[in-house]
Image: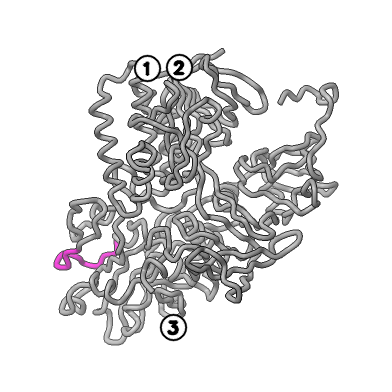
């Protein structure tokens, strides 16, 4: 079952968009879960560090220079496909930090516990919200949530207040 | 059925107006499509089909399909998805094809 | 009778670009739309657009609509008539209108038809029940009128519209039971599909709706799996709890005005149905009648804007007021080619080639 029939990328597709192993524990990094050639390049224009390389063709997939990426999360808020996530494995010994787009109301508040959902929408546990950036109506809010380290590679959405969604 | 909080859209406060639907007093917002006001009030059935008397509601909500024809202020076959709500409007379901009044009775309605 | 250089029918992204482009060259433009506000389908698009910076990528459709409407309103040589339906275009260059219930006529040297598209209907038992709505209707209700269409929706179609509207339903506080897609593949962008999968909406490919249940309103639906020949497989029926069924199974161009004006039409399935024959400047077989946007072939908003601009240039050249047509046309061509370089646009390219008689 492929991305084209399920909407869920394969492990192989995902590993290709992660930084090299030795760089992952150093600092936060952005993961661009963008696997399809469509005309789109706001990620290139919005990165203040220039970590997204210039597009030769607007249909190209983003190419990231992880020596420049600081994991600030600006790309998370700008991607029209909501396909970018920041992972910070260095957050603590037991937990990492995820920065996820969340365009719903009510927004969670720092300290709140939220449900963590994986790429298939399965609930994988709970996480504590650390910060919410971009709360004005029309922004794409980015929620910073603490996640147990072993779930960092799977969790890609949150559910606030136990409701659907 | 009305949306109060939305992550992207801001629904501005609009003026509430009273209208009548099948002898029932109802409220909606001035200038919204009549079909939206009815839908918000829980009214799904806008008419009954000509041959088999089946329940009928709107479909396209943009004025293309003619599924939403109702009688408004005595005028039949009004597309309520494009007709705007005004204070005091009288809205009724019609059964099948509406009856268009003779020119003398139409009171100046050109089209 | 009011006389104009060009009448543009439809003030969505294609019509707005067509009108503003012609107006920039000095044409007197009448911009007509049967809706109460300018912007066509853009006024319901709460998601951020893809494309290039030039095509306003990263901006929400609703804000693009606002900017384009402001630009049109600022041009003194554009006369905007809303709540106005174009009825017919005649050989003496008269365009008849129903302007808020009043019948009137205008004269125009050129005509640009940007009337967009409508949802395809699907055949299934009880498809006429209240609660069966087109995806566009659901979007209008939620995003323009601020009213929820129902409590729980079955979405039929996993093209971009089905996927995007499913997401918008969640944003409006409505739950989505599932998206069914007849094809074995999801038709829309993978990122749109991923976005709803991680929020718990299942996407059932090779599935379609068999029937709706209910008498006065939808109370549920039955879906089933399809075989390789698109036929439902008995025994695979599954009941879906829902009170709303949203049809997003494709669009057909709205071309009544083009038929009525006598344009040569051709049936091209890749473009959504019947479309007019056009040359590269989007002029139809009737001199001075141009077409742009979904009415010329189903594509998407960025393409609508670019084809609108091309048609606007075509009109300006037709009127003899476009000194730099070649240069501006090449610019637009390049942009639209870039847009159409991705795999998603191959169907459209095949359709256009068929239309131009380059293939059968």
What subunit carries mark 1? C
Q: Are marks 3 and 2 on the same chain?
A: no
Magenta residues, start to end: A64-74
Prevailing secondary structure of the magenta residues: loop
Q: Is residue C213 visible?
A: yes
What subunit carries mark 2? C
Q: Secondary structure at mark 3?
A: strand
| Residue C319 numbered tag | 1
Q: Pointers 1 and 2 in contact (CB under 8 A)?
A: yes
Q: Measure the C-alpha gap from mark 3 to mark 2.
A: 66 Å
Q: Which percent across, then down, holds residue C221? A: 64, 67
Name the residue beneath numbered marker 2. Answer: C109
Which residue lies at the image location 31% right of the left edge and 54% below the top edge? C343
Which residue lies at the image location 30% right of the left edge and 64% below the top edge? A35
Which residue lies at the image location 57% right of the left edge and 67% below the top edge? C232
Q: Are marks 3 and 1 on the same chain?
A: no
Measured along the vertical axis of the image, is residue A90 above or below residue C233? below
Q: Nearer the viewer, residue B45 or A86?
A: B45
Q: Secondary structure at mark 1?
A: loop
Query: Which-is-in-front pick, marks 3 and 2?
Result: 2
Q: Is residue B11 visible?
A: no
Residue A48 lies left or right of residue C132; in this view the side is left
Q: Which percent across, then down, holds residue B51? A: 80, 48
Task: Choose top left, top right, bottom left or bottom right for residue A27.
Answer: bottom left
What subunit carries mark 3? A
How many residues crowd around disc 2 within 10 Å: few (fewer than 14), some, or many (20 or more)?
some
Name the residue beneath numbered marker 3. Answer: A125
Q: Measure the C-alpha gap from mark 1 to mark 2.
A: 8 Å
| Residue C233 numbered tag | none
Tell whether position A130 is magenta.
no
């Amino acid at each position: 079952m492929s991305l084209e029939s399920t909407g869920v990328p394969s492990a192989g597709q995902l590993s290709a968009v992660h930084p090299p192993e030795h760089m992952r524990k150093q600092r936060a990094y952005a993961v661009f879960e963008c696997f399809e050639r469509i005309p789109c390049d706001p990620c290139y224009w919005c990165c203040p560090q220039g970590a997204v390389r210039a597009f030769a063709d607007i249909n190209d997939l983003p190419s990231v220079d992880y020596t420049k990426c600081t994991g600030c999360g600006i790309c998370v808020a700008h991607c029209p496909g909501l396909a970018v996530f920041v992972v910070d494995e260095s957050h603590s010994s037991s937990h990492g930090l995820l920065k996820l787009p969340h365009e719903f109301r009510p927004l969670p508040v720092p300290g709140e516990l939220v449900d963590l959902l994986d790429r298939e929408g399965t609930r994988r546990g709970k996480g504590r919200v650390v910060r919410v950036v971009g709360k004005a109506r029309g922004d794409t809010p980015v929620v910073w949530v603490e996640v147990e380290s072993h779930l960092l590679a799977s969790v890609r959405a949150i559910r606030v207040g136990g409701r659907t969604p | 059925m009305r949306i109060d909080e939305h992550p992207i859209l801001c629904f501005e406060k609009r003026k509430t107006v009273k209208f009548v639907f099948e002898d029932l007093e109802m409220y909606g917002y001035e200038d919204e499509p009549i079909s939206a006001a009815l839908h918000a009030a829980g009214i799904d059935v806008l008419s009954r089909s000509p041959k088999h008397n089946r329940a009928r509601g709107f479909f396209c909500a943009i004025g293309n399909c003619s599924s939403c024809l109702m009688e408004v202020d005595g005028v039949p076959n009004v597309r309520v998805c494009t007709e705007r709500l005004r204070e005091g409007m009288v809205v009724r379901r019609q059964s099948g094809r509406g009856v268009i009044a003779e020119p003398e009775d139409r009171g100046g309605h050109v089209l | 009778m009011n006389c104009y250089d060009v009448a543009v029918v439809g003030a969505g992204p294609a019509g707005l670009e067509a009108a503003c482009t012609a107006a920039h060259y000095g044409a007197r433009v009448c911009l007509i739309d049967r809706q109460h506000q300018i912007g066509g389908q853009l006024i319901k698009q709460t998601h951020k657009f893809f494309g290039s910076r030039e095509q306003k990528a990263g901006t929400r459709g609703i804000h693009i609509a606002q900017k384009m409407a402001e630009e049109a309103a600022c041009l003194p040589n554009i006369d905007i008539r809303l709540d106005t339906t174009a009825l017919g275009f005649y050989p003496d260059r008269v365009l008849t209108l129903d302007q808020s219930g009043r019948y009137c006529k205008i004269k125009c040297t050129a005509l640009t038809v940007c009337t967009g598209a409508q949802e395809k209907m699907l055949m299934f038992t009880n498809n006429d029940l209240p609660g069966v709505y087109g995806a566009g209707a659901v979007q209008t209700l939620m995003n323009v009128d601020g009213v929820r269409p129902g409590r729980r929706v079955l979405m039929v179609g996993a093209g971009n519209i089905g996927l995007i509207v499913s997401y918008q339903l969640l944003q409006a506080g409505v739950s989505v039971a599932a998206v069914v897609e007849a094809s074995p593949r999801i038709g829309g962008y993978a990122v749109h599909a991923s976005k709803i999968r991680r929020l718990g909406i299942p996407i059932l490919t090779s599935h379609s709706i068999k029937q709706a249940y209910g008498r006065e309103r939808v109370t549920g639906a039955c879906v089933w799996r399809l075989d390789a020949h698109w036929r439902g497989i008995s025994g695979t029926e599954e009941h879906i709890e829902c009170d709303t069924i949203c049809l997003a199974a494709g669009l057909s161009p709205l071309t009544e005005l083009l038929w009525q004006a006598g344009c040569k039409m051709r049936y091209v399935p890749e473009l959504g149905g019947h479309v007019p024959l056009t040359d590269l400047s989007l002029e139809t077989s009737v001199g001075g009648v141009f077409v742009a946007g979904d009415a010329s072939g189903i594509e998407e908003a960025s393409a609508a804007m670019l084809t609108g601009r091309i048609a606007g240039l075509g009109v300006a050249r037709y009127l003899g007021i476009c000194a730099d047509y070649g240069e501006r046309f090449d610019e637009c061509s390049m942009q639209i080619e870039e847009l159409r370089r991705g795999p998603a646009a191959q169907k459209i390219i095949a359709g256009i080639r068929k239309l131009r008689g380059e293939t059968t």
